[in-house]
Image: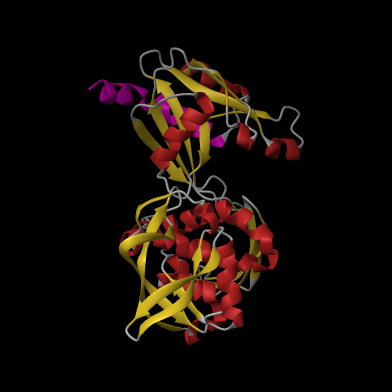
Amino acid sequence: MPRQIFLYGTLRDPRILETVAGPGAAGLRLRPARCPDHAALEVAQTGCPVLRPCPGAEAEGLLLEDPGAGVMARLEFFEAGFGYALAPVTVITAAGESEALAWLDPGETLQAAGRWDLAAWTRADGGVMAEAAREYMDYMDRGAAAPALWHGVTIRARARANAARETPVQALRHGFTRDDVELVKLERPYANYFAVEEHSLRFRRFDGAMSAPMLRAVFTSGDAVTVLPWDPVTDRVLVIEQFRAAPWARGDKAPWTVETVAGRCDSDESAEEAARREAREEAGLELGRLEQVAAYYPSPGATAEFLVSFVAEADLGAAGGVHGLDIEGEDIRAFTLSLDAALAGVRSGEIANGPLVLSLFWLAAQRENLRLAWSA
């Protein structure tokens, strides 16, 4: 077997290659290469590439020489999780033509169309993939079970990438930043679609000293959206009702909750795109204009979830019914009621969902301004 690997895809990003290769990354021997009569094509719904025969084309890449058993095992774990397997290819370097191996999709079962561009992918998705790779490689001990975690990994990675891009407002706060926290150790005792992380850390105190080492457990779930559809003509809102495991776990006698339409942001969509998708899935509803209520942590003492809440313009004349995705086991009752009746539900205690309470109060205060703005 050739001791050379042709890298044509995401592993060409040095951040990802360094993470995936692990401790052996510093010793990697790489040189530019190209694969004749092949092209790197974008796989549908992933943004990642696959190498396919394409007469007259040339796929650019890197030739990795003799990576060693340890690095090779890590690379194989990363690539095999996406359904790729090593296959022989011919490559050309400055030294001439040679044989190598590349990760391809056996049977060409992946749907691919259009050329994959490394620079464009790096701008759009490179940061998220780098974050995802850092977490995913921690699951090597799970072997064949690890790929099932990928969807949750990418959602959490998108949240971390979002946070890295944000500029914090610190008009009221003391001014501490991430540089004032020392991470000693990070472990994930539980990981699936959600994860529990245990952070051993020290943080700067308000007297300037560093705290003693302490352990903080955090429930990580990725960023999410909520959206309250409102009909400005009839002054009615749409809410949903569904069974929730958390009230059940607490011992609630009626663990069905009245909520806003809500859901996680997939790794490739904006908060507004997620809000519109969730409205279709959970209420069969197409939304008009959206107005952001707030962006916030609902419970920062224990969960890393970050929410963006919207109020949305909607025609609710025929809205309602039972909706949800069967694949996610959803059984969601959507119904409408007047804004005043919804506010009465808050007062009675029947509406006890934080994002819905926040959105209803915001709408009650802003409905005339919003009605005027949308009518214009």
Is residue 209 visible in the rendered structure shown here? no
Residue 242 spot, x, y in % from top left: 63, 28
Vertical position of residue 266 compared to residue 83: above or below: above
Q: Residue at x 43, y 44 (%)?
A: 295
Q: Taken as a whole, is the magenta stretch helix, strand or loop? A: helix
Q: Which residues are magenta?
A: 354-376
Instruction: Tell me which residue sits at (45%, 34%) in the image.
Output: 277
Residue 18 position within the rendered picture, expressed as x and y whole percent measured from the top left = 48, 76
Q: Quadrant of the N terminus?
A: bottom right
Q: Is residue 84 located in the magenta-colored stretch of the structure?
A: no
**Residue 98 higher or lower than 305, as above or below:** below
Whether residue 92 can be seen here: yes
Q: Nearer the viewer, residue 155 or 229?
A: 155
Quarter of the image for residue 371 reads top left
Is the residue 92 above or below the residue 355 in the image? below
Task: Name the spot of residue 204 as percent of width and height, x first.
Answer: 52, 71
- Tell me if 10 is positioned left or right of 222 in this view: left
Residue sitting at x 58%, y 60%: 81
